[in-house]
């Protein structure tokens, strides 16, 4: 945590309200995100209990499993989940725009531009918390290797038709969520924690209710009081007023409400099976559906506050203007979404259980690049984020006091203006350190030449002695040499060189982060690193199913 | 006591988890532990003969002391024999802060060569051969305590050796078929041992308490509060997941304005400043020595933060 963040947290403690950590929204939010609030059965790995899902905040679709240990009921739940989620994904997959991508021509080995489709927008998925993201990943893993009756007529316990497909998509979303700065699958807590500092620890910030209480406390109450209520307050029946955001449930809910309701359901089922005539069967069927309705309403009641909290969180984040460069990251999400669509359409097998060494290394490298990229972009989009980098000596703000034109010594001289910048900050500059500024959204490079005082030589001692004390320390004058983006001519293009009086933010980090060295293609990888032989075949087998399987 | 102090702990276990955990453990140990021993032999059995029939000694006895003694005896007998022995829910004693604490591992297996292996049976899944790292870590810490307790008995048992690799048994993928992995707990064992030797003896804590202090939950909230306050505590947010008094300690720590309520790491950044008010006063220039590097850094941070917020408010953004 940077000192600025710590300070923001302390301000929050003091004021009783969360304080801003960002002045723009750094995550892209689509106009029509799909919100998913899942619940799972305690102690079971893959036994969902219920979910609220949908794109309309006033009309969530309720999915519930009356007896989580019953495979048929779980499959019915997953089939329904597929019907709720896949149309959302497919409508985005079908709306495309033409785009270009550079590919290596397999024959010539040269890079060429090819025309491809790019989905005009990707389907965004929002869950309440990080545990929700893990659950999406778990659901994906549990479904993508399932076989349907169509895949294999002999498969025991065939899965409903669209369940494996949902598994592949959820796996993709879960993987994408590991990429820093991605917005394809977001946890509401992460979204809010990125933009606000509360007066509690980051552990407590994982509680969605407490987090919202700090950011937007009810009138007349402090964030701390409201958060405490969200964490612990219970009604007369011992139930939490703000149920956990899932997928785990509160043990008191399980023990006092859900368990008796499930028992009643089981009893009604046994009774129905034992009915000997039509009349009794009708009556007992009524019992059964009553028991089922009871479970559904219990689950709905315990998920609804979380559902509303997610939408409230989205409202709060939408209250901030969107950071300019978050669009750029969203475009990457769209590429990722499109690429997965293409893999599914091409009939490729589901993602393997474990990545081979090359894929794993590739993903790791991509995530590192994405991390550096999101850090740079957020700093450029947001003065408050930039402030943290300035404090760390990785950026500085200064006023241009002087510009002196110089040129390269070549047959066709190019401009190399020397710009003197006055600042009271202390960037970590060494000889020829590169610094960058944003010029019409593109980075312009300069290199550090030296401190004006040192360059002036004998005046050095004098000017240090006369240095003014700014709020952040002594002022100094830095000399930078601009090295690019000034056009092709001898004289720089208009507007491409800073002018005296300009206040400019310079960064020591690059604005566009490029990936590291390329890794070999899978087929050129030695077997010690997971290359051929065998390849993906091994990973494709479905999980062995037994009568006791939970999913 | 937490309830009596007015901050009840929110812990509890769902009966679904309990039922599933018990069912899974029963399944793992069914049939005289055949499946359990098969897994153990597969992962840790190097050099020994495959277990056919294992001995399952009866460990019932009256009270924890009795059961501990019975366990020690069974361990000695098992070590002397040259077969496999499975101790189901043995009882071990470990001295913590000068008082004995009784522990009940899920199982301990004695190998033919006299090695004792701790077995932990957990109901979280191992998916594609890997389980949730946090949960495995917790299981490893728990097992390390058992290893320490076993080492005390082993030191007085001829031919005995406590394995530092414990067997963690979990459900495989989404089934309830057991699978196992070996966890080396040497690191956790060293950490726990260090913590145990550092713990103040309970008698010493008691001796430092004011006369008449009591921890009887039947007392009034004030009486209890005073008593609890007399014991030095170092609240940090990690307590919330582990300690039943955490909400009480948090309230107290917040009332004192301690910066640790925001996380242990925060303290390191703030040098000698320990309270929220102190830090904010230093940052705003009302207090503190500007020559102190922490104070200087705080003021710089505060100035940069204020300037950035102002820039954003004004809409004029510097690019
Ligand atoms: S300081 Fe932490 S561990 Fe100690 S009593 Fe308080 S909450 Fe429990």
Image (spheres, coloured by chain):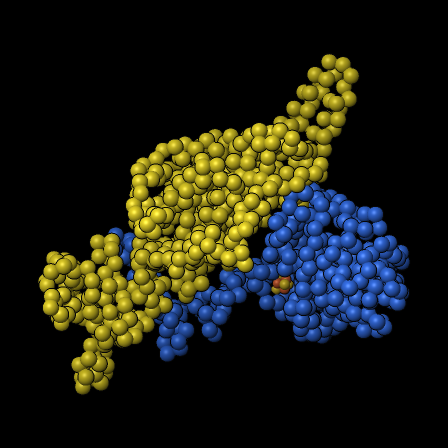
Q: Residue furthest front?
A: A107
Looking at the rendered image, the quarter that the C terminus of chain A falls into is top right
Residue B187 position (above or below residue B88) = below
Residue B151 position (above or below residue B6) = below
The image quarter containing residue A454 is bottom left
Q: Residue A273 location, x and y as percent?
A: 75, 23
Looking at the rendered image, the quarter that the N terminus of chain A falls into is bottom left
Answer whether residue A351 is visible to the viewer in this image. yes
* Residue at (40, 68) in percent of width and height: B281
Please state which of residues A499 and B140 is positioned toward the viewer in this rendering.
B140
The image quarter containing residue A264 is top right
Please state which of residues A95 and A521 is positioned toward the viewer in this rendering.
A521
Q: Residue A334 location, x and y as percent?
A: 38, 43
* Residue at (58, 40) in percent of width and height: A145
Please state which of residues B160 and A189 is positioned toward the viewer in this rendering.
B160
Task: Describe residue B252's horizontal placement relative to residue A312 as left or right.
Answer: right
* Residue at (42, 39) in percent of width and height: A342
Answer whether residue A257 is visible to the viewer in this image. no
Which chain did the image draw in yellow? A
Q: Colour of chain B?
A: blue
Q: Residue A300 location, x and y as percent?
A: 57, 34
Residue A210 position (above or below residue A398) = above
Q: Residue A296 location, x and y as percent?
A: 60, 31
* Residue at (60, 45) in percent of width and height: A248
- In the rendered picture of this protein, how many numbered marks are placed on residues? 0
Q: Quadrant for ligand 1?
A: bottom right
């Amino acid at each position: 945590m940077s000192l600025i963040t710590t300070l923001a947290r302390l301000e929050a403690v003091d004021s009783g309200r969360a304080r801003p950590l960002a002045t723009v929204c750094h995550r892209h939010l689509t106009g029509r995100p799909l919100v998913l609030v899942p619940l799972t059965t305690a102690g079971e790995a893959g036994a969902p209990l219920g979910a609220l899902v949908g794109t309309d905040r006033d009309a969530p679709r309720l999915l519930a499993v009356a007896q989580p240990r019953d495979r048929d009921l779980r499959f019915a739940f997953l089939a329904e989940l597929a019907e709720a989620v896949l149309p959302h994904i497919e409508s985005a997959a079908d709306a495309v725009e033409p785009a270009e991508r550079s590919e290596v021509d397999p024959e010539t080995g040269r890079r060429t531009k090819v025309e491809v489709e790019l989905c005009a927008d990707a389907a965004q998925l929002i869950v309440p918390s990080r545990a929700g993201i893990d659950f999406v990943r778990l659901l994906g893993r549990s479904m993508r290797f399932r076989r349907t009756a169509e895949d294999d007529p002999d498969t025991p316990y065939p899965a409903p038709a669209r369940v494996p497909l949902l598994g592949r998509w959820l796996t993709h979303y879960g993987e994408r969520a590991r990429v820093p700065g991605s917005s394809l699958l977001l946890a509401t807590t992460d979204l809010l924690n990125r933009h606000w500092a509360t007066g509690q620890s980051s552990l407590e910030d994982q509680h969605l209710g407490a987090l919202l209480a700090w950011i937007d406390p009810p009138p007349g109450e402090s964030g701390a009081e409201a958060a405490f209520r969200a964490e612990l307050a219970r009604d007369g029946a011992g139930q939490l007023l703000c149920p956990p955001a899932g997928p785990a449930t509160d043990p008191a809910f399980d023990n006092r409400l859900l368990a008796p309701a499930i028992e009643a359901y089981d009893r009604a089922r046994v009774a129905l099976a034992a009915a000997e005539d039509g009349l009794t069967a009708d009556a007992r069927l009524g019992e059964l559906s009553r028991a089922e309705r009871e479970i559904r309403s219990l689950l709905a009641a315990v998920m609804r506050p979380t559902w509303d909290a997610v939408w409230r969180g989205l409202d709060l984040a939408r209250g901030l203007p969107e950071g300019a460069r978050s669009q750029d990251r969203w475009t990457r999400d769209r590429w990722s979404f499109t690429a997965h669509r293409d893999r599914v359409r091409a009939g490729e097998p589901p993602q393997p259980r474990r990545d081979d060494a090359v894929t794993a290394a590739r993903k790791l490298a991509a995530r590192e690049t994405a991390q550096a990229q999101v850090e740079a972009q957020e700093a450029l989009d947001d003065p408050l984020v930039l402030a943290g980098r300035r404090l760390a000596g990785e950026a500085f703000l200064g006023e241009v006091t002087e510009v002196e034109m110089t040129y390269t010594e070549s047959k066709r001289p190019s401009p190399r203006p020397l710009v003197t910048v006055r600042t009271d900050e202390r960037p970590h500059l060494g000889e020829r350190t590169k610094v960058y500024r944003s010029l019409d959204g593109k980075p312009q490079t300069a290199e550090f030449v030296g401190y004006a005082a040192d360059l002036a030589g004998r005046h050095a001692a004098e000017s240090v002695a006369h240095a003014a004390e700014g709020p952040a320390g002594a002022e100094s004058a830095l000399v930078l040499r601009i090295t690019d983006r000034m056009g092709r001519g001898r004289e720089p293009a208009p507007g491409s060189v800073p002018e005296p009086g300009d206040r400019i933010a310079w960064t020591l980090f690059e604005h566009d982060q490029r990936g590291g060295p390329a890794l070999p293609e899978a087929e050129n990888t030695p077997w010690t690193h997971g290359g051929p032989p065998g390849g993906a075949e091994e990973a494709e087998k479905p999980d062995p199913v037994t009568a006791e399987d939970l999913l | 006591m937490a309830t009596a102090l007015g901050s009840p702990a929110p812990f509890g276990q769902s009966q679904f988890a309990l039922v599933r955990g018990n069912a899974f453990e029963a399944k793992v140990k069914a049939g005289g532990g055949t499946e359990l021993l098969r897994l153990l032999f597969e992962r840790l059995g190097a050099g020994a003969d495959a277990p056919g029939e294992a001995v399952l000694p009866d460990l019932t006895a009256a009270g924890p002391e009795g059961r501990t003694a019975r366990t020690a005896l069974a361990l000695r007998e098992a070590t002397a024999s040259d077969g496999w022995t499975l101790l189901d829910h043995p009882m071990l004693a470990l001295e913590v802060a000068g008082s004995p604490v009784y522990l009940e591992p899920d199982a301990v297996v004695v190998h033919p060569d006299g090695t004792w292996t701790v077995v932990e049976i957990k109901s979280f899944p191992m998916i594609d051969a890997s389980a949730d790292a946090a949960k495995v870590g917790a299981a490893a810490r728990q097992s390390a305590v058992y290893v320490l307790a076993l080492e005390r008995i082993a030191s007085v048992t001829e031919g005995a050796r406590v394995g530092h690799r414990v067997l963690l048994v979990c459900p495989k993928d989404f089934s309830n078929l057991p699978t196992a992995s070996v966890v080396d707990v040497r690191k956790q064992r060293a950490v726990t041992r260090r913590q145990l030797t550092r713990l103040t003896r309970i008698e010493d804590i008691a001796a430092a308490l004011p006369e008449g202090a009591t921890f009887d939950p039947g007392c009034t909230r004030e009486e209890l509060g005073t008593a609890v306050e007399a014991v030095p505590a170092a609240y940090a947010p990690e307590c919330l997941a582990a300690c039943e008094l955490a909400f009480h300690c948090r309230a107290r720590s917040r009332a004192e304005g301690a910066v640790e309520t925001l996380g242990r790491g925060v303290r390191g950044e703030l040098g000698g400043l320990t309270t929220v008010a102190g830090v904010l006063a230093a940052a705003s220039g009302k207090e503190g020595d500007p020559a102190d590097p922490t104070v200087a850094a705080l003021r710089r941070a505060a100035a940069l933060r204020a300037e950035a917020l102002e820039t954003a408010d004004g809409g004029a953004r510097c690019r």
